[in-house]
Image (cartoon, helix red, strand yellow):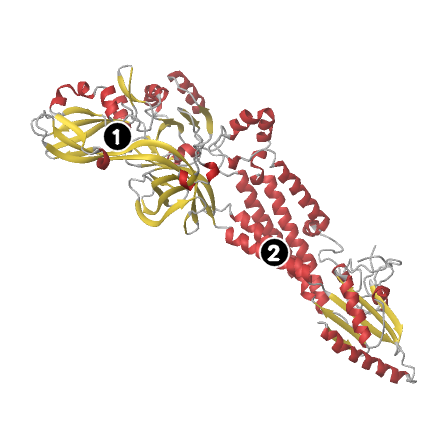
């Protein structure tokens, strides 16, 4: 008895603590849950219309507007010009718009972007990021602060004033 | 209080020892408690010590069987809570924060807020499971090691009080009257013991003798049954936890439109539904009583599936480098499987839609054939060639509509596809001519294709030659259940070990018989088993009968009522 027994005891309890800690934290911080306001925005990598890969973490430190849209959704189409105007106004101030298209054909999106003269990154999603973010009605917009936390989830058509109010509040 | 744990035989016992580890003498004054407490052979649990540290306290907390039973009971109650409403993972595509409130009202909402909609993955449920695991490991270790030590160095000659304290006892004075000297009687006694050995061996006992004392023992291995059982359980629990590792477990439902290549989430696999078939029994095949009632009985739902593995550029299905790794006609309960990945038939839907058309560009006047190309409804290419002409797809609408005089699309599904080409080539202006093409005749008329194309309509005609050969239509969306469960072999291993332990502990009993002869002819017998006392008494009486001692099995019972 004595020392070796003590070591075995500590080793076994340590092992249990390790496995238990992992199992419980896995349950607490699992990303199976749909992100809510206050959660960290789940990371993703998507092909952009510009042919480049865009990672959410590339935009770390910026205030983000992540917008899920499609040309088939009239309110999405209507709010696009407002998003472009706000983008033009604030893009110098660590603000970025990521417009995630909902699984449409490239030609369709390209023509739309040209027609509306959109200059912010357009990302092409094949339903994976949409599912990850639990988006089921369009348009849905996520406002993310510079720490990567979701500060607001908006499921409606947005106006200039609305977007501006959200991002100036974030920029503080 | 300092407990004196030294036995009169000179053996130093651990704190908490009930029966001396060496001679078996009861260490505490336990008058009247006959039979003796034989659990774990009276040895102390490993964790019991005089001055416990914090770690010792944690250890002895989990070492308690009472705590283990308590933990199991709480887990049982927690599991029951999870059965009140269907759990989140039983639904496809729901938002639980809305669904439970809408479906079950305020109760459902509270249920959701309490986290009971995903009971079995909640932190507290996992904490309970982990605690049960800890308790299993520590309880077993604390008992199996001292027990192993006690059983592997048993003293043959046990204390008289130990023998008399057993549940099965017998004592008599042997009739060695003809021997007058005590030496002769002692010699006779050891002969008597030696005579007994073959009879005991015949009944499967291992026999150890020492002068005029004997220990016969059989099926000691059955004592390890519960601990092997616990090892199985621990493997089982660990395997279940391993499902949380990335790539170890998946249980998803996905729709596959005929022809579509869909990425299996979280893997490097792509799955394609080449064709879905539904087949019904014909009237003739139905049993007579079901005929003529217009009943439709399904005979077969089949998805012709191809599984691809991606080696590079695994994002967009259009660009990924794919290799066919498996092909299977999936029917109900007959899944496609490849290296631990399974795809089961789950549901289907009739979703007729255009997939692609092979069109021909012709001269509208002369009917001259310029060339053919394939137009896909999903993500069409943006440039085509037909003879001397180049067609650039400048816009594409899947579900064409006019909204406020502007062209637009109503949905993502190709319900009314419209292709807008910019045609350049001989005898056309440098900037090209716009040509709108509707693959569906009904749309051509509805939106008046010729009128939209105006003058160009007179120059070109884009059309399909054969409805059968050139038009590809996807009729069905097949829903498949995609599964990976890499923990399953470990779960089975754990379960099998568990069962081996159960069988060892249930079908065999550890039986021991101690005999000592004092003063040459005073025979004392004590016997112990962990169960089936009837069998043990039988062993004792039949062996004694061989030596001429007629004993009633019932009379062996040590005054207490037990089986």
Q: Considering only vertical position in the picture, is A62 above or below B177?
A: above
Residue A117 location in percent, x, y? 27, 23
Element carrying mark 2: helix
Q: Considering only vertical position in the picture, is B549 above or below B444?
A: below
Q: Which residue is mark 2?
A: B498
User: Along the line of sight, which residue is nearer the eye, B52 or B490?
Assistant: B490
Quarter occupied by the N terminus of chain B: bottom right
Quadrant position of residue B81: top right
Residue B152 location in percent, x, y? 70, 68
- Please identify the residue farthest to the front as the structure is shown: B288
Seen at 8% across and 27% down, the residue is B366
Q: Considering only vertical position in the picture, is B157 above or below B473?
A: below
Q: Which residue is mark 1?
A: A107
User: Along the line of sight, which residue is nearer the eye, B445 or B159?
Assistant: B445
Seen at 53% across and 42% down, the residue is A26
User: Along the line of sight, which residue is nearer the eye, B345 or B106?
Assistant: B345
Q: What chain does mark 1 sit on?
A: A
Element carrying mark 1: helix
């Amino acid at each position: 008895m004595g020392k070796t027994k003590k070591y075995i005891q500590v080793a076994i309890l340590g092992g249990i603590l390790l496995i238990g800690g992992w199992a419980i934290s896995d349950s607490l911080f699992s990303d199976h849950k749909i992100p809510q306001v206050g959660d960290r925005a789940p990371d993703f990598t998507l092909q952009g219309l510009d042919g480049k890969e865009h990672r959410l973490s590339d935009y770390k430190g910026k205030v983000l507007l992540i917008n899920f849209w499609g040309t088939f959704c009239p309110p999405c189409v209507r709010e696009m010009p407002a998003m472009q105007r706000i983008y033009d106004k604030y893009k110098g101030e660590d603000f970025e718009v990521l417009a995630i298209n909902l699984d449409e054909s490239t030609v369709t999106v390209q023509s739309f972007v040209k027609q509306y003269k959109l200059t912010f990154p357009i990302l092409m999603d094949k339903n994976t990021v949409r599912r990850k973010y639990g988006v089921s009605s369009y348009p849905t917009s996520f406002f993310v602060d510079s720490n990567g936390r979701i500060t607001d989830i908006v499921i409606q058509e947005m106006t200039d004033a609305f977007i501006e109010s959200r991002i100036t509040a974030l920029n503080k | 209080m300092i407990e004196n744990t030294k036995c009169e035989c000179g053996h130093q016992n651990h704190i908490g020892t009930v029966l001396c580890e060496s001679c078996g003498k009861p260490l505490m004054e336990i008058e009247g408690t006959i039979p003796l407490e034989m659990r774990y052979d009276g040895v102390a649990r490993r964790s019991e010590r005089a001055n416990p540290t914090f770690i010792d306290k944690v250890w002895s907390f989990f070492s308690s069987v009472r705590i283990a039973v308590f933990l199991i009971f709480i887990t049982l109650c927690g599991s029951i809570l999870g059965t009140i409403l269907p759990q989140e993972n039983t639904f496809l595509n729901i938002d639980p924060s809305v669904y439970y409130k809408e479906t079950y009202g305020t109760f459902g909402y509270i249920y959701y807020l309490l986290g009971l909609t995903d009971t079995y993955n909640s932190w507290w449920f996992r904490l309970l499971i982990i605690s049960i695991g800890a308790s299993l490991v520590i309880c077993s270790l604390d008992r199996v090691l001292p027990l192993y030590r006690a059983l592997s160095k048993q003293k043959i000659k046990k204390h008289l009080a130990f023998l008399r304290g057993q549940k099965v006892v017998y004592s008599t004075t042997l009739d060695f009257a003809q021997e007058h000297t005590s030496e002769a009687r002692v010699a006779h006694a050891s002969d008597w013991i030696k005579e007994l050995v073959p009879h005991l061996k015949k009944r499967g006992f291992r026999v150890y003798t020492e002068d005029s004392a004997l220990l016969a023992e059989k099926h000691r291995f059955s004592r390890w049954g519960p601990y092997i059982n616990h090892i199985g359980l621990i493997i089982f629990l660990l395997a279940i936890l391993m499902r949380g590792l990335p790539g170890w477990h998946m249980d998803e439902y996905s729709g596959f439109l005929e022809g579509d290549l869909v990425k299996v989430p979280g893997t490097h696999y792509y799955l394609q539904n080449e064709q879905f078939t539904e087949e019904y029994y014909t009237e003739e095949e139905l049993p007579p009583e079901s005929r003529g009632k217009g009943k439709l009985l399904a005979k077969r739902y089949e998805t012709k599936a191809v599984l691809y593995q991606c080696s590079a550029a695994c994002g967009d299905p259009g660009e990924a480098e794919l290799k066919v790794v498996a092909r299977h006609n999936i029917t109900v309960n007959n899944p496609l499987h490849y290296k631990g990945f399974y795809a089961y038939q789950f549901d289907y839907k009739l979703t007729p839609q255009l997939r692609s058309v092979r069109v021909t560009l012709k001269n509208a006047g002369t009917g001259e054939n310029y060339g053919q190309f394939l137009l896909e409804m999903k993500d069409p290419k943006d440039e085509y060639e037909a003879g001397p002409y180049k067609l650039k797809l400048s816009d594409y609408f899947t579900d064409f509509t006019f909204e406020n005089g502007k062209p637009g699309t109503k949905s993502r599904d190709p319900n009314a596809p419209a292709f807008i080409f910019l045609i350049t080539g001989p005898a056309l202006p440098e900037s090209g001519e716009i040509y709108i093409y509707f693959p569906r005749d009904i749309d051509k008329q509805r939106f008046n294709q010729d009128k939209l194309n105006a003058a160009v309509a007179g120059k070109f005609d884009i059309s399909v030659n054969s409805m059968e050969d050139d038009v590809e239509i996807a009729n069905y969306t097949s829903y498949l259940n995609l599964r990976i469960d890499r923990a399953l072999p470990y779960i089975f291993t754990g379960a099998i070990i568990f069962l081996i332990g159960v069988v060892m502990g249930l079908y065999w009993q550890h039986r021991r018989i101690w005999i000592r002869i004092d003063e040459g002819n005073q025979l004392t017998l004590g016997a112990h088993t962990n169960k089936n006392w009837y069998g043990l008494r039988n062993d004792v009486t039949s062996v004694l009968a061989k030596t001429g001692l007629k004993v009633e099995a019932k009379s062996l019972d040590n005054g207490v009522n037990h089986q």
